[in-house]
Image (cartoon, rainbow, N blue to C red):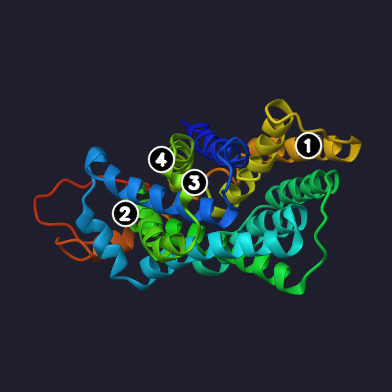
């Protein structure tokens, strides 16, 4: 089904977009870094626990961890959490979000082109430009009290690069035949393990209460475990750049929830940004060329004959009936 992949990615983005509202409704005493670390720890171990329920094996995850791509993907998931919250603390929510989320799809498209050979379409470039423009208007419609910081912007760019990194590496592992849940469990299980010391070093008194534990479980098991299974299912069928652009639905959902649930207000500029961002997402959804992976090139008849166990190409066994050669089956990703 052509729409299954985009819908899975958009649903994942919608789940990710609930994290800010969930944190705002959480108990007092939480900090963004502690909540982010708890989310990755719980979500990572949730993905590992999900393996046998989805017919996967922990041994497959261990095999990924023995590869360079598997290790780098895990480090990238942990680095994203740390760098993003450093960026927000240094530059404010608006600038940190804009730089991280706005440059993420662009970096993912570049990495996918260099490492995977995925060539983005012109329609993807236009749709991504429209989405990023909408994001600029959206964050400009809010208020930010933090001053501009070179360190903060550098941290935001590092977070965007980490996001692009684990997305492209996950795509590579999916191409190699690994199951989506195995790929996500490998990346986020390792990332969560790396952030356990960080979580223990931060104030975690808020986890002792029912609201705090409920917040950690929701962010971990729903937005991370479930969200990234959906994300991987979409990534398995769509080009990397298209997935990264569709994920820009996250700030749209977050803003809508802020208005509906938290009684936040959005000015004219922010409202215009929402409309432009939605338009860009619709453009990306309508671009069927960038939402469909190219099929692999059909092997030539000569190559098929040369690699078969039969006689050389162009020659026929005595007594064998002559007829048209069977056409090799065309394989997709």
Of callouts 4 and 1, which one flags the residue occurring earlier in the amino acid sequence?
A: 4
As drawn, the residue found furthest toward the top would be: 260
User: Do the CB atoms of the residues marked 3 and 4 lie less than 8 Å apart?
Assistant: no
Mark 3 Cα within 10 Å, few/some/many (few <14, many 20+)? many
The mark found on residue 274 in the picture is 1
Say what secondary structure mark 1 lies in.
helix
Say what secondary structure mark 4 lies in.
helix
* Separation (CA) of disc 1 from disc 2: 38 Å
Q: Is residue 164 above or below residue 222?
A: below
* Separation (CA) of disc 2 from disc 4: 25 Å
Residue located beneath label 3 in the image:
206
Left or right placement of residue 209 versus residue 289 in this view: left
Residue located beneath label 4 in the image:
221
Q: Is residue 333 above or below residue 304?
A: above
The structure residue drawn at horizontal position 90% and vertical position 35%, both measured from the top left corner, is 268
In depth, the one of 154 and 120 nearer the eye is 154
In depth, the one of 245 and 194 nearer the eye is 194
* Separation (CA) of disc 2 from disc 3: 41 Å
In depth, the one of 97 and 69 nearer the eye is 97
* Separation (CA) of disc 4 from disc 1: 28 Å
* Separation (CA) of disc 3 from disc 4: 18 Å
The mark found on residue 177 in the picture is 2
Left or right placement of residue 122 versus residue 310 in this view: right
The mark found on residue 202 in the picture is none
Say what secondary structure mark 2 lies in.
loop
Of callouts 3 and 4, which one flags the residue occurring earlier in the amino acid sequence?
A: 3
Of callouts 2 and 4, which one flags the residue occurring earlier in the amino acid sequence?
A: 2
User: Do the CB atoms of the residues marked 1 and 2 lie less than 8 Å apart?
Assistant: no
Residue 126 horizontal/vertical position (percent): 75, 49
Residue 307, located in which quarter of the rendered image? bottom left
User: Do the CB atoms of the residues marked 1 and 3 lie less than 8 Å apart?
Assistant: no
Q: How many marks?
A: 4
């Amino acid at each position: 089904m052509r729409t299954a992949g985009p819908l899975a990615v958009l649903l994942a983005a919608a789940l990710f977009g609930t994290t800010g509202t969930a944190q705002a409704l959480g108990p007092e005493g939480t900090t963004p870094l502690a909540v982010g670390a708890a989310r990755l720890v719980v979500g990572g171990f949730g993905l590992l626990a999900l393996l046998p329920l989805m017919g996967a094996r922990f041994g497959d995850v261990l095999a990924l961890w023995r590869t360079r791509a598997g290790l780098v993907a895990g480090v990238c998931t942990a680095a994203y959490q740390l760098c993003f919250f450093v960026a927000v603390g240094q530059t404010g929510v608006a600038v940190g979000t804009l730089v991280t989320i706005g440059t993420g799809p662009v970096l993912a498209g570049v990495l996918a082109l260099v490492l995977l050979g995925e060539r983005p379409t012109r329609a993807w470039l236009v749709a991504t430009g429209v989405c990023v423009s909408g994001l600029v208007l959206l964050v400009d419609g809010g208020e930010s009290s933090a001053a501009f910081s070179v360190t903060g912007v550098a941290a935001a760019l590092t977070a965007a690069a980490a996001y692009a990194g684990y997305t492209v590496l996950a795509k590579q592992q999916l191409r190699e035949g690994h199951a989506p849940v195995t790929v996500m469990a490998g990346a986020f299980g390792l990332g969560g393990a790396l952030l356990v010391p960080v979580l223990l070093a931060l104030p975690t008194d808020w986890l002792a209460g029912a609201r705090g534990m409920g917040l950690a479980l929701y962010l971990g098991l729903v937005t991370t475990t479930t969200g990234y299974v959906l994300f991987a299912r979409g990534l398995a069928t769509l080009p990397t750049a298209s997935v990264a652009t569709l994920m820009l639905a996250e700030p749209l959902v977050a803003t809508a929830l802020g208005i509906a649930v938290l009684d936040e207000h959005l000015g004219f500029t922010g409202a215009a940004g929402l409309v432009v961002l939605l338009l860009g997402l619709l453009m990306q959804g309508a671009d069927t060329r960038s939402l469909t992976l190219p099929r692999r090139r059909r092997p030539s008849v000569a190559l098929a004959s040369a690699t078969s166990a039969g006689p050389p190409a162009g020659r026929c066994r005595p007594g064998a009936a002559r007829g048209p050669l069977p056409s090799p089956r065309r394989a997709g990703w």
